Amino acid sequence: MTITETSPVTPTAQATEPGEQRWTPRLWGVLAVLCAVLFLDGLDVSMVGVALPSIGAELGLSTTSLQWIVNGYVLGYGGLLLLGGRTADLLGRRQIFLIALAVFALASLIGGLVDNGTLLIVTRFVKGLAAAFTAPTALSILTTTFHEGPARNRALSVFSVFGASGYSSGLILGGLLTSFGWRWTFLTPVPLAVLALVAGYFLIPRDKRAEEGGHDLVGAITLTAGMLLAVYTVVSAPERGWLDPLTIGSVVLAAALLGAFFYTENKVAHPLIRLGILKVGTIVRANLSVVALMGSYLSFQFMMTLYLQDVLHWSPLKMAMALLPAGLLVAFGSPFMGRLIDRYGTSPLILTAMISMSLGYVWFLSTAGNAPHYAFTVLPTMLLLGGGFAFGFSSIMAQATEGIDDSEQGLASGLVQTAMQVGAALVLAVVTALLASGSVGGNDFGQFHPGINLVTGVALAGLLFNLVPMIRRRYQPQHA
């Protein structure tokens, strides 16, 4: 069964010839709504990161409390992504997308008005929960709206541009808006989210609930609880200690819940996740690749933010401008990725991305010394990382969903985005633990070397598990 046979949005997905699709104004409108939501996600994350010092100063929050403004979002986002994607498959993508987007807008509004740190963290958690439903649902709407092949690859490349643009814009806007007050970093996304909500209501075609498939209540509970506890453990362990009894107990309990989930999925008639999807090699590689891509990139950027602001005492805006080249390269390079995917396929592009990322980190380690020079070390590194991200993100998303039936697009989308969020949180948690052993805020860059070594190793691992299968496939016919 092909995607074009089952697509629930045929009014906007008109094919002229087999494998081709005519881009109608409404089809462009649907893509614009989905891109706007991804833009908002990137915008929100980067703006809030820049505003953290101002939030802490006004609300009297400690560094420990401030980290939960970021980690609370990750906790809700990473913990419910799989459930969000599967819920959209079962209950209807349009309905879930619009409800979650409304919750995101409301939580943003409340976050910009509260005067209590705990309530602010709660609103961030709620926004993470909403994003756990909007993100995989948006991607599954895209992959079921656009036919697999050139149309979908082109749409994914445009989709990626807005994600990178949102993050890059958030760095600049965060620096500007924070000078007027940190609350504007929370309130700015509200009107944009409302506009996207109204446009989505009129443009996204109605789809039907799944005709087959029940609700796996036990699977949903064990998966959600296990993922939430796993993400909570990852983000809290650096502060508490990896060998703390509570940390160890959380790891054991999370493993038990996830073990119960996998046991349940093999027994129930209508599982939340069809485990057979994990036997598809390309899907497994896509999920591992996104861990290497996002885990290394976000952790490196986190360390550079600390170095430029806390060690060199740069302003938030100056720091944002220093990191901007990577985002600009992604924004300007991603539109061409669809054509490259059509011509070369996803695997060579993902391998190219991992090579570029690895070279960036190796160059940084080779030239940084104890006081990295921006023009000679930091800028070339950011360009290599931006190029790697541009090649990798669209290709990974395409590989993670290619060949998957419409009925499981939400599941495939949720899987890869869960890997992205949870994997990035895990790498960042270990990096944070390594930094905690040093004296961040001192005058020596050497304290960051262990963290740079780790992200380099993560990128090289991503390179290896993409390179080995390609070598194996190349020489397999000779041994057949």
Image: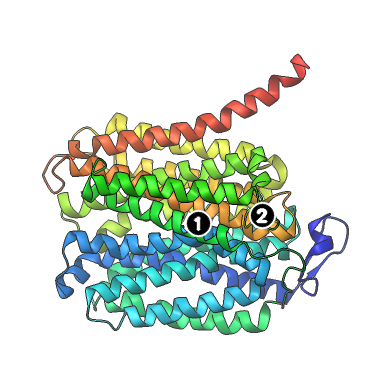
Assign a secondary structure to mark 2: loop
Question: In the figure, is residue 308 to the left or right of 383?
Answer: left
Give the position of the C terminus as an image quadrant: top right
Residue 175: quarter of image? bottom left
* Residue 242 x/y as whole percent: 26, 42
Task: Write down the quadrant of residue 159 in the picture.
Answer: bottom right
Local crowd at mark 1 within 10 Å, few (<14), some, or many (≥20)?
many
Where residue 227 appears, as percent x and y from the top left, is 45, 54
What residue is pinned by disc 2?
A: 268
In terms of image quadrants, where is residue 26? bottom right
5 lies above or below 187:
above
2 or 1: tag closer to the N-terminus:
1
Pick the residue in front: 408 or 213.
213
Residue located 32% across and 47% down the image: 249
Q: Is residue 466 left or right of residue 59?
A: right
Q: Identity of the amino acid at label 2?
A: Val
Q: Position of residue 446 (x, y in %)?
A: 18, 35
The residue that appears at 29% across and 47% down in the rendered structure is 247
Residue identified by numbered label 1: 222
